[in-house]
Amino acid sequence: MGKRVLLVEDEKNVILGVRTCLDAVGYDVEIVEDGGEALDAVRREHPDLILLDLLMPRVDGFEVLKVLKGKEDTSKIPIIVLTAKAEEEDKQRAMDLGADSYMTKPFKPQELWDTLKYYLPEA
Amino acid sequence: MESERLLLFQFISKCFERKAGVKLSNLPETVNLDTIANNLADAVFLVDREMNVVWLNQRAEEFFHTSSKKAQGGKITELTAINKLEDLLGEVFEQETALKCSYEEASVKVKRHDERYFFKIAINPIFHQGNLWGALVQLTDVTRFHEMEKIKTDFVSIVSHEFRTPLTTIIVGVEMLKEGMLGDLTPRGKEVLEAIGADCERLSRLIDNLMELSRIESGTIYVEAEPTDVADLVQEAVRPLKIQAEKQGIELITDLPPELPPVAADFNKAVWVLANLVGNAMRYTDPGGTITVQVRQRGKRHFFSVEDTGSGIPKEHQDKIFRKYVQVSGPGRKGTGGVGLGLAIAKDIVMAHGGEIWVDSEIGKGTTFTFTFPVFQGGESVTLPEAEEKGG
């Protein structure tokens, strides 16, 4: 069985792109479009890794990071931030909240695969 | 008071004579000093050597909510709440030369009734019977100009953000199609996708540059000068470009003496500057050409130079190329794939380190860009010069 990746992203086209990218190398992808849903999904599914957008309506990515990295049972799940926020301060804030990796959009599939492989070595 | 007004009148009439060839004594009697001074859009003050206000025009009274009576004899710094004037006036009095700062250098922020104003300052010394008597201080309201700059900077920042998301979809899609992961392609189809991929790279680079620029313009950039190994810096900047240079048939040489003392630089930003210069050189150098990256220490400075054997930059363009959005076109200058921000940013970064950047070029022979960074002296960090000051 492939590793389970939760993609938290609200842009339809980016979802299509990232999903295609992950399908191609055999990950199981679940998609949620909002931070609140993301928290529910994590509780329910306990994914192996989370790809997290920062700018989302209602509960944003920073909040998701804060909650998940603040709780013992979810703090071990690697979280890779995928965002259009390229400012150093945003990156610092996300890393301080416990993000494992920070990727600025746009990125190439290879970069995403390499990062995923690093955090999910057996896949 | 009258004698001072006379002095001012003489001063202004001299300026008129010099600039416009008009003798004020030839003007109708109804045109006098007040007519001129009070119809100026700028706030004008006459101060003595102690920086006390001797005279001010109507605009100055209006703006600083005062009257001639109240203002006279008081310190100009107190009246205007522009503390910076003290230093600037001191400088003018000491050197006995005029200070006419550019907008970037000497705009000050003044807060009044919760509104912010920006002024450009010009100071002219006034001499009386050969001795320094005082100065004429002129404040030009550049608030509107400042606002426009801010709007532009914000706009650039927003644009660079908004482009990132759609570009993600395009790049991910193109790359996967190109690799044949979504089905077979015709040779022509692959060629087209290669071209799209290359242009996407170009757009990404442009977005990065725009963002860097808006960061610098908004004054939030912070240059942390740390002891940095020169060889590491050069290596980091040149390495990613080696393959590209090989592909283009250009020889990329690095020439640095062993055991250079460390440079005081923000590593990533310094690498960016050097990589940008080498990247430029590659765009303007034909196959068979050479690009040499050289570092030399002279006194307390390291001189970094990037020399190419490209087409050269015409003399008339050499001054302009460090300005924003300026690109030089002409014979032998290939399509450049930028908007002319690279050098403007490079200049900002170099200057933030307290260095200088310049170009030497000869048509048909080549171009050398040189910039200096200070040799590391001790623990210090440098910020961009702040051209603002908060008034009360």
Image (tube, grey):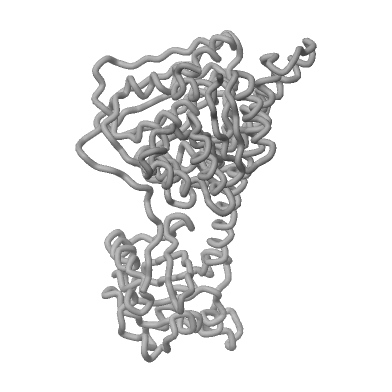
Residue lying at 21% horizontally and 35% vertically, measured from the top left = B377
Position of B389 relative to B47 (above/below)? above
Q: Is residue B90 left or right of residue B123?
A: left
Q: Is residue B184 left or right of residue B22?
A: right
In the image shown, does B373 or A118 lie closer to the viewer? A118
Residue that extends furthest to the left in the rendered view of this protein: B378
Residue that extends furthest to the front in the rendered view of this protein: A44
Q: Quadrant of the N terminus of chain A?
A: top right
Which quarter of the figure has residue B249? top right
Q: How many marks?
A: 0
In the image shown, does B117 or B40 lie closer to the viewer? B117
Residue lying at 49% horizontally and 37% vertically, measured from the top left = A81
Position of B255 relative to B119 (above/below)? above
Position of A97 relative to B14 (above/below)? above
Q: Is residue B42 left or right of residue B266?
A: right
Please provide percent x and percent y for residue B310: 57, 19
Residue B73 visible in the shown view = yes
Which quarter of the figure has residue A108? top right
Residue lying at 53% horizontally and 66% vertically, measured from the top left = B143
Position of A54 relative to B377 (above/below)? below
Residue B352 visible in the shown view = no
Please provide percent x and percent y for residue A115: 48, 24
Please provide percent x and percent y for residue B316: 59, 36
Please provide percent x and percent y for residue B308: 51, 19
